Every structure is written in C-alpha cells, then in structure tokens.
Amino acid sequence: MDDATRGRRLIFVGGSPRSGTTLVQNILDSHPDIFGAPEFLHLPDIMNLRKKLYGSIDRGWIDLICSYDDVDKNICTQIENFFLPLADKQECRFYSEKTPGNVLIFNDLLKLFPGAHFINVVRDPRAIIASMLKVGERGKKEGWKTHDFTHSIPAGVDYIGKCFHEGSVCSKSTPERVLTIVYERLVSNTDTETKRICKFLKIGWSDEMLNPEGKKHLGEKAICNKVWYEKKRFNSNPE
C-alpha cells in the first residue's frame, strides 16, 4: 500500500466522554459500508509505545534494530491487522474505531494514517459535565471505580478542555481530514448532519443512519454495564 493512502479504510471517532461519540458510532455502524466495532481502548497505549521507541532510537539504543519509519510502518500494519479483518468479514469498506480518548491522539494518528478519516464530536460542556457526574453516581452505586472527571466538576472541566483543544487544533489544521460534529445539531437535524458525514467520507448516504435503534451494535457488549450505559439508552435514536 502507498504510504499516502495508508489507513484509507479507517475512521477514528473521538471526543470528550459523554459528548455523543457513541451515538455517532452507532449512526456510522448503521451505514451498510461501515463496520462500527466495540471500543478498542488501547490506541493511546500504542502511541505511548511509539513515543518510547522513538526515544530509544534518539538515544542510539535501538537505532541498529529499527528506524522511525520502521516503527511507524509496523505499528500501522498491526493496527490495521487488528481492525480490517472484522470489516472484511462484514463486507464493509470502512472500519470505524470509536474510543472517546482517541481525540487526544488524533495528531499522532493523522501522521501515521494519511488516508484515514477523523470525526471529532463536541457537545455543550454543561451537558457533558452533568452526564459525567451521573456516571460517577451510578459507578458508586454499582461499586465501580470511575475516572476523577465523573466525580469532580473541576476535573471534568479540565478533561473536557483538553479534549476540545486537541480536537479543535486538528480540525483547524487539517479540515479536509477531520470533521467536527456538534451533538446538538446531530440530534436536531439528523438528516443534514448524516449527509455531511457521508460527503466527508465520500460515500452515498443511507437512510438507515436515521434509525440506529433498528440495528444491533456490537459496541453494546463492551460498555453496557449500567454505569456508562444501559442497553436501552445505548441503542436509542437521536433525540
């Protein structure tokens, strides 16, 4: 594969937790050409490994073993080997990986996958904070340890700020590759916003995207635990 088109079948969705990334993923998964998988979760860990390998090359520890380019090619190959067989099995052109924290590594992923598409999801921060605190309450009730931002408004504001900043920087610097979706617009004008998504991905629009509730989404398996989502809420349509 040409380096310039690496990642052309990948869609990375990110944004602050509780911003609407799950709804966007379910809408994408409802399109016949897109497979929306459960959250992979570990791309930040892989990017951290990349940074460590780069550091070891800089120090001359492993430069005889691999170069920066070797590291990137191997990481990209491994990520695509994780994802694309599932898309192939579903006979889908695209694989969509949605983990909210992806937004914090969009900059790295943009460099690694020149052909990939990125969707940055934003929402009114007040609504995000309110939703985060509810997660914290449910987590406490269920005996789950949840992130600090689900218990503390200042921690929530800080984390949302980081997500918004990273998403905004990438969206402004590479608008042809990063599409920002505003949750409030998505739920109030789903038809128009889903057509924007399809135009961005250069695929035909499908009215199935208006009814994500009508399809079972595999992401349900990973996050429907009564803390982050209940099954009924997870599968709901835009509202």
Image (tube, rainbow, N blue to C red):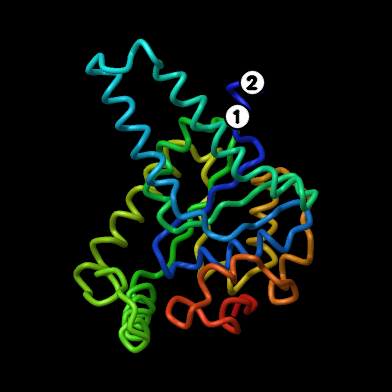
In the image, residue 132 above or below residue 103: below
In the image, residue 30 above or below residue 73: below
Q: Which percent across, then down, holds residue 73?
A: 51, 24
Residue located farthest toward the bottom when viewing the structure as drawn: 141
Residues tagged 1 and 2 counted as in contact (Cβ below 8 A)? yes
Determine the secondary structure under disc 1: loop
Mark 2, residue position: 2
At x 79%, y 60%, the residue is: 206
Q: Which percent across, then down, holds residue 78?
A: 55, 35
Residue 6 is marked as 1
Label tally: 2
> Which quarter of the rendering shows the C terminus?
bottom right
Taking depth in this image into account, of 192 and 50 the one nearest to the observer is 50
Taking depth in this image into account, of 176 and 118 the one nearest to the observer is 118
> Which quarter of the rendering shows the N terminus?
top right
- The local crowd at label 1, few if under 14, some if 14 to 19, many if 20 or more residues have their Cα within 10 Å, is some
- Hey, what amino acid is under mark 1? Arg
Residue located farthest toward the left when viewing the structure as drawn: 154
At x 62%, y 57%, the residue is: 37
The image quarter in which residue 62 lies? top left
At x 38%, y 76%, the residue is: 127
- The local crowd at label 2, few if under 14, some if 14 to 19, many if 20 or more residues have their Cα within 10 Å, is few
State left or right for residue 170 relative to residue 232.
left
Taking depth in this image into account, of 160 and 220 the one nearest to the observer is 220
State left or right for residue 42 relative to residue 149.
right
State left or right for residue 205 relative to residue 73.
right
* Distance CA(mark 1)–CA(mark 2): 6 Å
At x 64%, y 53%, the residue is: 197
The image quarter in which residue 77 lies? top right
Determine the secondary structure under disc 2: loop
